[in-house]
Image: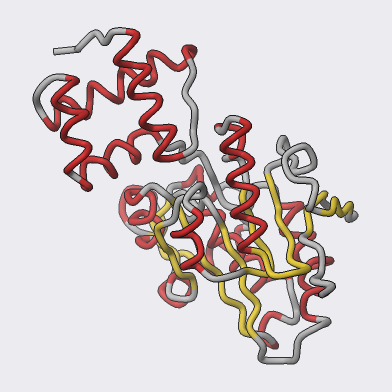
Amino acid sequence: MTVIFTDDELERLRDYLYRQTGMWFGETKRYYIERRLNDRLAHAGGDFAGYMSLLRIDSEERQALVNAFTVNETYFYREEHQLTCLGRDLLPDIVSHRRPGDKVRIWSLPCSTGEETYSIALWLLENWRMVDAYNIEIVGSDIDTHALDAARAGLYGERALARLPESVREDYFEPTKRHRRRIIDDLRESVVFTHANLVDGARLREQGTFDVIFCRNVLIYFDEASRQTAAQNLYDRLTPGGYLCLGHTESMSRIDERFIVRRFEDAVVFQRPEDTR
């Protein structure tokens, strides 16, 4: 049975999700919220008041609710121009200060079901001739635990693979049932996936620092306060001189003036200044 929620109940849930994730779902998302909340109530049982009480004591249900509201639209080689920029400009600058064999860390946050994270690994293997000269560590993180499970499984349909060259699909993906392909074990094992929340600075510190961060198409779901929190956390997680790649409709210029806007041939990215102390 579909439950009809009051305005106060929906406001309470929106506030709760905002505190948990930084995402704000306005009145235009009413149907979206009601449908997902009804699904969770059907699973957990009880009424709205009982469900909100349950969220305080049941960490698994809290995570299930967050999972229900995340957006996982992605595919391989999305915004490929940024990958070109990564190999042509960003990594050459970073490794100019490193010795062969040194670690270079790249972070995909949020990583969703893994396509964008694996895209980084695939693109570097196929296009960056220095890939074997350094210890490249690629980490994908997301707030959605179901998405992370899918990323670790590495199983994808034709739509997700559509932008990949045929040679890449043949070399790095194994056919499975129902017209799906699984990314080969060597590549799956070369990428690390972790649970992380972009607005939880304390937990993000556990991830360490990174030379390049891809954080694409998530800030559009945040309000101004959440964007500023996210910007601070991303700044803190970048090494001095490190680079941040956002989605094509996003910009850090109006959120955090500490980032330097860098305009390369293939992409506009944002750089944390070098430490001058």
Query: Where the C terminus falls, by quadrant?
Result: bottom right
- Residue displayed at 76% across by 52% down: 81
Q: Quadrant of residue 240?
A: bottom right
Residue 227, x across and y down, in percent: 62, 39
Q: Quadrant of residue 262?
A: bottom right
**Seen from this angle, which residue lies furthest front?**
277
Name the colouring of the figure: secondary structure
Closest to the observer, 92 or 238 = 238
Residue 102, x across and y down, in percent: 67, 88
Query: Where the N terminus falls, by quadrant?
Result: top left
- Residue displayed at 17% across by 21% down: 49
Residue 15, x across and y down, in percent: 40, 26
- Residue displayed at 78% across by 75% down: 94
Q: Is residue 1 left or right of residue 112?
A: left
Vertical placement of residue 274 versus 55, above or below: below
**Seen from this angle, which residue lies furthest left?**
46
> In this figure, what is the number of numbered marks?
0
Closest to the observer, 207 or 142 = 207
Q: Is residue 127 left or right of residue 24?
A: right
